[in-house]
Amino acid sequence: MDQVTLKADLDALTTAQNVSMEEINPVTGLTTRERLLVQRSWQELLKLGRSTVGIEIFDRYFTMFPQYIQAFKKFRDIPVEKLKSHPRLKAHGTTVLNALDSIVGRWRCFRFYFVPPSFNH
Ligand code: HEM
């Protein structure tokens, strides 16, 4: 990951003096500047690889909230110490990353994803 380019881009977005940067999206409550900061950071994160990031997110999530492993039919029978390296976690992590990418990447259409009943779980 090119930390220098990322930092330069984030600094430029943070300090850009443009009135449209302060426009607030009524659905997300985020300004244009905030959306662009998230999208630029997300783009950089994906360079690590979707399955790598997906596995890491689930590993951290299940470490913080182990009780939610039981919610997943496909994980509940896997011993917890084997979960991080299990192919099912990799597959699910990649699916969730793809779903997140379609949301973050097409954020201008955010309402279609997050206004019920489209987002129902
Ligand atoms: C923005 C956050 C989330 C996204 C983008 C997301 C995305 C997805 C997707 C795409 C699937 C379908 C996977 C498949 O068909 O194989 C799924 C399934 C599921 N999600 Fe999420 N999810 C999110 C948050 C959560 C959270 C916080 C929970 C809480 C436990 C959760 C619980 C589940 C469960 C239980 C399933 C069914 C898995 C199974 O078949 O065993 N999700 N999610």
Image: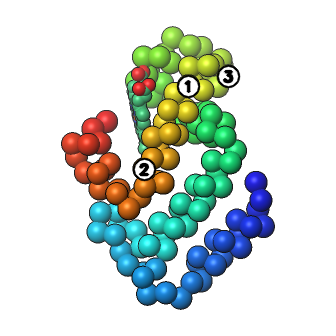
Q: Which residue does the numbered mark 3 point to in the structure image?
A: 85
Mark 3 residue's CB less than 8 Å from ligand 1: no
Instruction: Tell me how far mark 2 sits from mark 3, CA to CA.
Output: 27 Å
State the image quarter where residue 120 is shown. top left
Asked if ligand 1 lies within 8 A of label 1, the reply is yes
The image quadrant in which ligand 1 is located = top left
Residue depicted at x 42% and y 50%: 103
Q: Quadrant of the C terminus?
A: top left
Q: Amino acid at mark 2?
A: Ile
Where does residue 38 sit, x and y in percent of width and height?
A: 53, 62
Contact check, label 2 and label 1, Cβ < 8 Å: no
N-term mark: 2 or 1? 1
Q: Secondary structure at mark 2?
A: helix
Q: Position of residue 22 (x, y in %)?
A: 42, 81
Q: Circle 1 is placed at which residue position?
A: 91
- Taking the image as shown, residue 7 lies to the left or right of residue 66, namely right
Which residue is labeled 2 in the image?
103
